[in-house]
Amino acid sequence: MMVVVEDGQVVIGDLGIGRIEVGGVDIAGGEAEEVALDLRAARSRAEREVLQLALTQSGGNLSSAAKLLGISRPTLYNLAKEHGLAIEP
């Protein structure tokens, strides 16, 4: 396969491949610089998603969610607060 571009910059959309997802964001249709590929931001998004999943699977029970995550209940509470997740202590 050969890709020819006018401005000398190849972006994911030029490659003709389907959906590519990074941190829950589809980047295949646009230029790479449109997506923040900051490692701290990606870790934060992943952490938030896992926290939400654990809280959902535990029916909102903090002790059960903490156990699923392998962390203490106070740590779960602090992480949820850090990520702006509304939970009852």
Image (cartoon, rainbow, N blue to C red):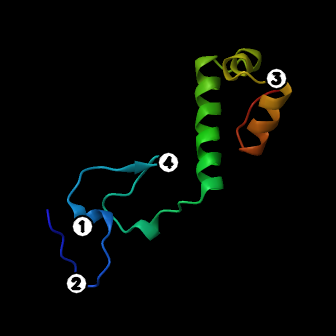
Amino acid type at image mark 1: Asp
Q: Earlier in the sequence, mark 4 or mark 3?
A: 4
Residue sitting at x 69%, y 20%: 65
For the residue labelled by badge 3, is the local secondary structure a helix, a strand or a loop? Answer: loop
Q: Kindly identify which numbered label has been placed on residue 23.
A: 4
Q: Which residue is mark 2?
A: 6
Camera-side mark, 4 or 2: 2
**Split into 4 quadrants, where in the image is the N terminus?**
bottom left
Residue 52 place in picture, x, y as percent? 61, 32
First in sequence: mark 4 or mark 2? Answer: 2
Q: Are marks 4 and 1 in contact (CB under 8 Å)?
A: no
Disc 3 designates what residue?
72
- Outermost residue to the front: 1
In the image: residue 86, left or right of residue 52: right
Residue most toward the left?
1
What's the CA distance linking mark 4 and mark 2? 29 Å
Q: Position of residue 51 (x, y in %)?
A: 65, 32
The residue that disc 1 covers is 14
In the image, residue 4 above or below residue 6? above
Task: Name the quadrant containing residue 76.
Answer: top right
Who comes first in sequence, dot 2 or dot 1?
Answer: 2
Which tag is nearer the camera, tag 3 or tag 1?
A: 1
Q: Which amino acid, mark 3?
A: Ser
Tell me if residue 37 comes above or below residue 82 in the rendering. below
Residue 88 numbered tag = none
Q: Is residue 87 above or below residue 25?
A: above
For marks 4 and 1, the one nearer the N-term is: 1
> Callout 1: 10 Å neighbours few (<14), some, many (20+)?
some
Quarter holding residue 30: bottom left
> In front: mark 2 or mark 3?
2
Residue 12 screen position, x and y as percent:
31, 63
Give amino acid for label 2. Answer: Glu
